[in-house]
Amino acid sequence: MAKKCTTQNQSAYVANPLNYLSPHPLKQQNLTRKCRSWVGWLDRMMKPRMAWLAKLPWNYVALLTCLAIAVTTPLMEFLPFVISIAAVAIGVFAAGILMRDGLVMLIGYALTAILVFASVQVA
């Protein structure tokens, strides 16, 4: 499929790259079915535990930790596999804040400690 783009007195047809990248509908249904089971498991596991860690003012500590990880990410690019721990830690913090799960936030802090330890050991 192509869409017509018009700007002032010029017009051009631009191909829609998503049409070429979209999966077959049956594959999409299978993937959706598999994702529902994973998301259902996550939804059952994440509950508002230790919610005070995920609320103000304590969530600012997690947000500042994510900011510190994000700022130091370019330096961690030179260390093998350390950047993966950083990405998982940021994702865990995000899930903890969104689901108001303080236990998940504690897991994020533990991952951050592992990240710092691994960075020091590798460097």
Image: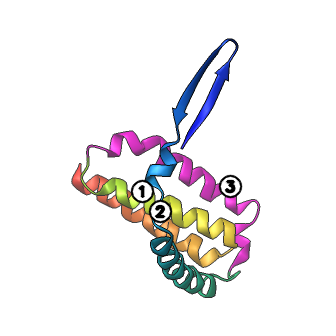
Q: Secondary structure at mark 2?
A: helix
Task: Specify the farthest residue to the top.
Answer: 9
Identify the residue position indicated by label 3 in the image: 60
Q: Is residue 102 above or below residue 69?
A: below
As measured in the structure, the alpha-carbon distance from the residue carrying label 1 to the one carrying label 3 is 18 Å
Task: Specify the farthest residue to the right.
Answer: 56
Q: Are marks 1 and 2 in contact (CB under 8 Å)?
A: yes
- Seen from the viewer's position, the closer of residues 34 and 51 is 34
Highlighted magenta segment, given as a residue range: 50-78
Q: Secondary structure at mark 1?
A: helix
- Seen from the viewer's position, the closer of residues 64 and 74 is 74
Identify the residue position indicated by label 1 in the image: 86
As measured in the structure, the alpha-carbon distance from the residue carrying label 2 to the one carrying label 3 is 15 Å
Q: Residues within 10 Å of mark 2 (few under 14, many from 20)?
A: many
Residue plotted at (48% across, 41% down): 71
Residue plotted at (44% across, 53% down): 21
Percent across and percent down for residue 88 are 44, 63
